[in-house]
Amino acid sequence: MSREMAFFMYLTERYAEYKNTTAGNVLEQWDNAGITERIFNLYELYHTEAIENAFADIDRCMKKE
């Protein structure tokens, strides 16, 4: 498994905890909003910052969609 995929899985699980839901629900919401690939591709940014910054960015993306 790539480090990007491992981090994506970690981010999905932590974001699900943050939203008090399941990772499956989060992934479905991201897919429906068309942002899953964008989130995956932001590995270089997200893994170097506080995870709360990633959450804030994802929340902004969800509001735009």
Image (cartoon, rainbow, N blue to C red):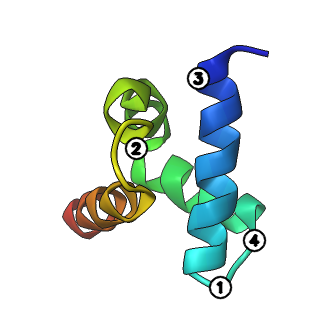
**In the foreground, 53 or 35:** 53
Quarter of the rendering containing residue 24: bottom right
Question: Are there few (<14), some (14-19), or many (20+) residues within 10 Å of tag 3?
Answer: some
**In the foreground, 39 or 11:** 11
In the rendered image, residue 37, in percent from the top left (x then y), is placed at 46, 31
Disc 3 is placed on an element classified as helix
Of marks 4 and 3, which one's residue comes earlier in the chain? 3
**In the foreground, 45 or 59:** 45
Instruction: Report the residue marked by disc 1.
Output: 20
Of marks 2 and 4, which one's residue comes earlier in the chain? 4
Quarter of the rendering containing residue 59: bottom left
Of marks 2 and 1, which one's residue comes earlier in the chain? 1
Question: Are there few (<14), some (14-19), or many (20+) residues within 10 Å of tag 1?
Answer: few
On residue 58, the disc is none
Q: Amino acid at mark 1?
A: Asn
**Discs 4/3, front:** 3
Q: Amino acid at mark 4?
A: Thr
Mark 2 → mark 4, Cα distance in angstroms: 17 Å
Of marks 2 and 3, which one's residue comes earlier in the chain? 3
Instruction: Report the residue marked by disc 2.
Output: 35
Question: Are there few (<14), some (14-19), or many (20+) residues within 10 Å of tag 4?
Answer: some
Instruction: Report the residue marked by disc 4.
Output: 22
Mark 2 → mark 3, Cα distance in angstroms: 16 Å
